Amino acid sequence: MDKYCYSVKRLSKLYSNNPFIWEFETNPDLTRQIYKYDQIIREVMVCLDIFRREKIKSFTGISLDVRGHSARSCILLLSILNHGCHFYCIDFKTTNNISQKLKDSGAEYVISKHIQNMDEICTTHATFKVLNHTYFIGILPTSQTSIISNRNICYTICTSGSTGEPKMIHVPYECIYPNIKSLCSLLKINEQDVIFLGSPPTFDPFVVEFFMALEMGSSLVVATNTAIRFTNSVQLLENITILQTTPSLFRLLGIQTIRDFVFQTTSSL
């Protein structure tokens, strides 16, 4: 497990005191909470103890009901990976044909904050807390799971269907990691970099952002869409050095922010 960029043993040894997650929220004013690697690792270790206590099987899929990134979602993703499982991010509120997608993903478990989202698709098995927020673990019926033989699957993603029928793609760690190494080298990423975790959890470019930070001990900025819109996003973006974006994110940022920050020669990017 130590050979993986997401290994908590590796992260603890190399980057324990580094700032890891800068979380921006609106409550109602824009607030920022910074978590160091060691704080996140402690939370992951608690989750792993719960997984073991509840006899969550390794080498299987765990679906995470998530709409946007947060410190909590990062903790859960690291917990799933360090338990030897692969993750499949899905937004129950906006996804059609959920049962079929969960079956195709190979997931045997579901983690969600919203028990009402789980009642029709799985049996609630346990509850636990992450940063004082309650989550539920559900077990999917055996008949609804697909067996994935490769034990080194890292994550599963569903294609958008823009070029045909949506497909479920199961990605081994060996397929994604060379890209991470190459990008870290090309972009000269180091521990001082601040990477914006801007791609949605259901869109696989987010894995690149997430893993680049883990590989190099960099920081991640996570924010809700509301926080991104807040005060033209400048306060949120001012320290970011790595920004991977899409047309939808550019629209969310707004013309003023793009002009004043993204395309400024004095920008930290």
Image (spheres, rainbow, N blue to C red):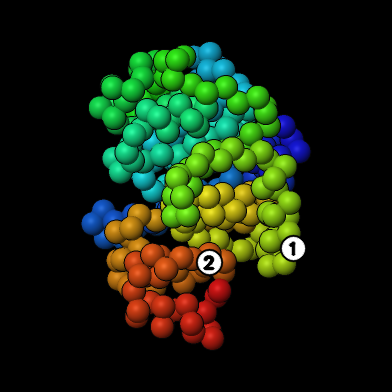
Tag 1: residue type?
A: Ser
Q: Within the image, what quadrant is residue 172 found in?
A: top right
Q: Which of marks 1 and 2 is nearer the N terminus?
A: 1
- The residue carrying pointer 2 sits among few (fewer than 14), some (14 to 19) or many (20 or more) residues within 10 Å by Cα, namely some
Question: Which of the image's four quarters has the C terminus?
Answer: bottom right
Q: Is residue 185 left or right of residue 229?
A: right
Whether residue 78 is visible: no
Task: List x then y, in percent, for residue 231.
Answer: 30, 71
Q: In this view, does 181 lie to the left or right of 49?
A: right
Q: Write down the residue under mark 1.
A: 185
- Is 108 in front, or is 2? 108
Q: How many labels does the image show?
A: 2
- Is 21 in front, or is 153? 153
Question: Please, what secondary structure does the residue beneath circle 2 have?
Answer: loop
Q: In this view, does 33 lie to the left or right of 36?
A: left
Q: Report the disc number at residue 243.
A: 2
Q: Within the image, what quadrant is residue 190 found in?
A: bottom right
Q: Is residue 146 above or below residue 92?
A: above
Q: Residue at x 57, y 17 (%)?
A: 57
